[in-house]
Image (cartoon, rainbow, N blue to C red):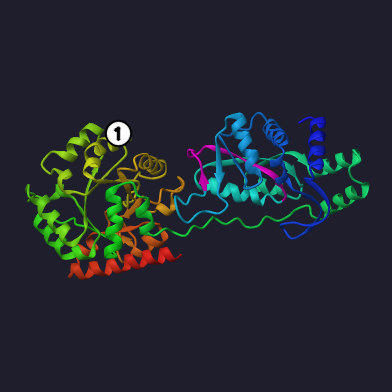
Amino acid sequence: MSSSSMESLILQLHEIGAVKFGNFKLKSGIYSPVYIDLRLIVSYPSLLTLISQTLISSLPPSTHYDVVCGVPYTALPIATVVSVTNSIPMLMRRKEIKDYGTSKAIEGIFEKDQTCLVIEDLVTSGGSVLETAAPLRGVGLKVSDAVVLIDREQGGRENLEENGIKLHSMIRLTDMVRVLKEKGKIEEEAEVNLLKFLEENRRVSVPSVEKPKVKPLGFKERSEMSKNLMGKKLFEVMMEKKTNLCLAADVGTAAELLDIADKVGPEICMLKTHVDILPDFTSDFGSKLRAIADKHNFLIFEDRKFADIGNTVTMQYEGGVFKILEWADIINAHIISGPGIVDGLKLKGLPRGKGLLLLAEMSSAGNLATGDYTAAAVKIAETHSDFVMGFISVNPASWKCGNVNPSMIHATPGVQMVKGGDGLGQQYNTPHSVITERGSDIIIVGRGIIKAENPAKTAREYRDEGWKAYLEKCSQ
């Protein structure tokens, strides 16, 4: 930015009353001899356009960014003009996060690991920039640069540098006052007072930046958001029966499975099967299990873990010996073969009102369903939200891929009353930790119930613990 352009811009800001001299209390609590109110520029379109264009042109050529985000609220119009003028995608950070809808902190379309340039109107301590950078980084974006119209030179540059953000400023406060004094807009005394103020307040501390907290939505609100009929039905079953317990019925025979399904049916919202391990499977197994599920009002989840290409899984789902499509309400799938697997399963399942859970994580030690794999599952689920109803997940609260659609249901395996493992890689967590700490919705319990002396009684205990944890999470 040339000195003549800077002088012209400073004089225009002074002319519209955006720069005031006197004694003003700032947000930090200290009193300042100068107050800068850049909210006024929205009423001066030509000045707003000039600022926005000059702001971007003042960046070093090496500065890389894929998207921009203005610090709410004053910098939003500046960022908007920058976005429109330069055809750069823009994101918006919500200053107040809604407790309904998608409850997103960051609005807009982006991909993990993209770089976001933060745009600000005025920097003092840099706190507002950090408050915006935190949720941007929280959803997987990189933030390494911020550009500002005016730097008050009170530690913001240094504070941001310590947090990995380089500050680029168009105008420094000392330059602004110097120009106004040289042009006869202020007296020498005003300049002297400002320089003294800056010397005494050279480093303003940054207030602690907390991660935004959003009150969790209950099953009722989330059911209304669900685009998948089976997902909506599962929410309704959980609310009606007051249970978020799924039994993993990994028993040795079909007869045992039907027996335990009838015994624990009143306590569960969902029964998970592995039909291909049953040596006595017969063609009427599905209808018998279906009758028990209807009797006790629970859904049937066949843990088939489809993983092949779309055409193959379509045939596996509908045909073969097991004819899973006929009796299972819910199935699951790996995404290792890409989104085509969802297309294949959806072709048969969606017209029948079925639902799909994607394996975003696994509970076995050393598994590879982490990081980018999990993020890819979330992206596919969002694209196919009419059929994908949720995830098999272990710790969704730790996911770095951004906020997941609240209509998606998280079901977590490997749950027992005490933490530990089984010696074969399976890791166990308690109902309370899975629901309240890890952010899941449904606890999947197998051996803890199946091998109990009284499976029905033990299922009731798990049901009570799981539901109590859900109510606690909703009250946080």
Name the amino acid, label 1.
Gly
Q: Nearer the viewer, residue 184 or 314?
A: 184
Left or right: 39 as drawn, with respect to 271 = right
> Is residue 168 something that shows in the picture?
yes
Q: Residue at x 58, y 34 (%)?
A: 65
Query: In the image, residue 269 lies at what x, y percent?
Result: 25, 59
Image coordinates of residue 289 in percent, x first then y, are: 13, 55
Residue 26's place in the image compared with 358, above or below, is below
Horizontal arrangement in the rendering, residue 29 relative to residue 281 (left or right): right
Q: Of helix, strand and loop, which one carries label 1? A: helix
Q: Is residue 113 magenta?
A: yes
Would residue 162 be counted in the magenta stretch? Answer: no
Q: Kindly identify the residue that appears in the image at 54 percent across and 46 percent down.
A: 137
- Neighbor class of circle 1 (other Cα within 10 Å; few <14, some 14-19, many 20+) is some
Residues in magenta, as a range: 106-124
Residue 425 visible in image = no
Q: Residue at x 36, y 50 (%)?
A: 408
The image quadrant that residue 75 belongs to is top right
**Residue 286, position in %: x, y?**
12, 50
Residue, disc 1: 340
- Percent from the top left, x then y, of residue 355? 26, 46
